[in-house]
Image (spheres, coloured by chain):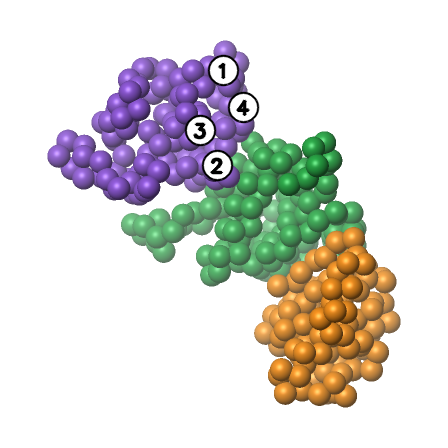
Amino acid sequence: MAIEVNGKTIETDEEGYLINLAEWNEDIAKILAAEDELSITDNHWEVIKFLRDYYDEYQIAPAVRVLTKAIGKKLGPEKGNSKYLYELFPYGPAKQACRYAGLPKPTGCV
Amino acid sequence: MEEQGVIKKFLYVNRKAPYGSIYALESLEVVLIGAAFEQDISLAFIDDGVYQLKKNQQTSVSSGIGVKDFSKTYRALEGYDVEKLYVDNKSMEERGLTVDDLIVDVQLLDDAQMAQLMEQQDVVLSF
Amino acid sequence: MLHTVNKSPFDRNSLESCLRFAHQGHSILLFEDGVYGALKGTRFETLLTEALKSYNIYVLVPDIEARGMRTDGIIEGIKPTDYAGFVDLVAQTKAVQAWL
């Protein structure tokens, strides 16, 4: 599979995750979100940015339980909870946000 | 995996160096997946397995072998509530390594302590 | 606890590491290339003879025969077993540890 971003073809796997993490940019995130009829707000960017930093540091995408806990630690309890994160990313905060962030699907997600 | 509420002791035994074979990475992935089941998890590093934890692994596409440096992932284990990492002291000494050479905090065990750890487990998974 | 060793002692230290950590009274099964450690006349014979004082050691006969070796070449005290015996050993034990 592939998506078109600014005239460039970006390859994705069959579930829509980027093949080459290095190709990611914010426009890709916006287009992937638009396909889900979602427009990315500052709150979304905050989580996406967090995930990209997490990946950079640990070389994995976190499981949702780990993400929730880590967000809470960094951004406070009002954001480090399932309700907040599922409202932002209704298809699953780890799964969906990782896709927009250009990361692989979290290990252990089915 | 288990009946709800039953917590078993799982030990992952790692005895292979990273990169030369897939064992080390596979083990780590199983640990991460298994962590979701909230069992009592310990990791042991023996023989060349201690090399998995060596600091300063450089594997980038631009200047290296071009694979993921998964040694960084051991530092994520704490966030997965996997906090019991044990290293065989003899394997460290044979390789001229000290705990300062390792990317994470570990507990060094002598032969008897490691044997004891193994004896306590319900399940031992070897890599 | 049952320990399994499936690598030749000439190739890897799996058997030696197993013997370093196994507790008195544990069982050890040698199979696949691990069976080379069960034979008389190798440089590991003394190690195995010594180990027999602490452990029950078994060897899988089909793997001995597949490699052109004979069961009468097995070190005295090591118990020859077949696949059914392997299964029994696993079934009797609380946990199995594979030394790869």
* Residue plotted at (80% across, 77% down): C78
CB within 8 Å, label 1 to label 4: no
Residue C89, how many percent across, how many down?
A: 78, 63
Residue A53, how many percent across, how many down?
A: 40, 30
On the image, numbered disc 1 is attached to which residue?
Answer: A83
Where disc 1 sits, the SS reads helix
Give the distance between the C-alpha atoms of the residues marked 2 and 1, in whole angstroms.
Answer: 19 Å
**Camera-side residue of C22 and A94:** A94
Residue B97 makes an appearance in the image: no
Chain on which label 2 sits: A
Q: Is residue A72 left or right of residue C89?
A: left
On the image, numbered disc 4 is attached to which residue?
Answer: A69
Give the distance between the C-alpha atoms of the residues marked 1 and 4, in whole angstroms.
Answer: 13 Å
Residue A105 makes an appearance in the image: yes
Between discs 2 and 1, the one toward the N terminus: 1
Camera-near label (3 vs 2) is 2
Give the distance between the C-alpha atoms of the residues marked 3 and 4, in whole angstroms.
Answer: 12 Å
Give the distance between the C-alpha atoms of the residues marked 3 and 2, in whole angstroms.
Answer: 9 Å
Chain on which label 3 sits: A
Residue type marked 3: Ala
Residue A105, how many percent across, how many down?
A: 41, 37
- For the N terminus of chain B, the image quarter is top right
Chain on which label 4 sits: A
* Residue plotted at (81% across, 62% down): C26
Residue type marked 2: Cys
On the image, numbered disc 3 is attached to which residue?
Answer: A94
In the rendered image of the structure, the colour used to display chain C is orange
Residue type marked 1: Lys
Where disc 4 sits, the SS reads helix
